[in-house]
Amino acid sequence: MIAVIAGLVFVGVVVVSIGYLGDRGWVRIGATADLARARVVYVTNLHLFVVTNGSHPVAVADRSPRAASRVLFCPTSGYFEDRSGSTFDRFGVFVSGPASASLARIGIRIRNASVDVNPDQRSPGPAVGSATPARPWGAACDPSAPEGPQGFLQT
């Protein structure tokens, strides 16, 4: 099941509570258990993805370093793809294509079993060649496939 709740796109069945926190730009995305079930969450209004990674989730920008085009997540491969043919693993690490860098990382923290992000805290992703990309889960998506739900390539 796919749900869109208050600017978040979850793949799976989840219950989420979001809201702005009172401390300098942090935004509550949801419970860690919900993120673990969904594996990947797209936050449309913040233009970022949150990806489960054990007890250390990763948040990445939804813009490719190549001409700032949007990236979409391929649910079958577990990779991000942009329309120019660049691919990035589920943690935003550059895999292939014309892009010259990995996806930007967004500040993220765990507090009281909740995941919070700070979209104002951006840093470059790992330098190309400095990190081994995660293996794909399965088959690649067609990068020209339509988007649906938001942030995800249709398979």
Image (cartoon, helix red, strand yellow):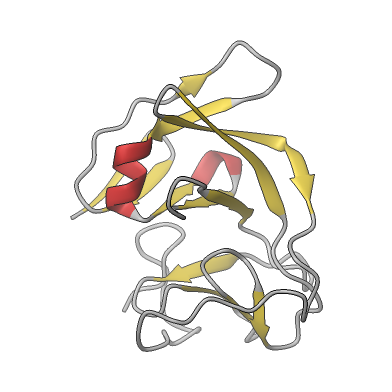
Q: Nearer the viewer, residue 112 or 76?
A: 112
Left or right, 2 with respect to 151, comes to: left
Question: Residue 105: percent from the left, percent from the top?
Answer: 69, 52
Q: Quadrant of residue 136?
A: bottom left
Q: Quadrant of the C terminus?
A: bottom left
Question: Residue 71: percent from the left, percent from the top?
Answer: 58, 67
| Residue ranking furthest to the front | 55
Q: Residue at x 59, y 48 (%)?
A: 47
| Residue ranking furthest to the top | 22
Q: Nearer the viewer, residue 44 or 40?
A: 40
Question: Residue 132: percent from the left, percent from the top?
Answer: 64, 79
Left or right, 53 with respect to 133, comes to: left
Left or right, 89 with respect to 64, comes to: left
Position above or below: 21 against 87 = above
Q: Quadrant of the N terminus?
A: bottom left
Q: Residue at x 23, y 41 (%)?
A: 14
Position above or below: 46 against 54 = above
Q: Nearer the viewer, residue 54 or 119?
A: 54
Q: Quadrant of residue 146?
A: bottom left
Position above or below: 131 against 121 = below
The total of numbered circles placed on residues is 0
Position above or below: 66 against 52 = below
Q: Residue at x 36, y 71 (%)?
A: 75
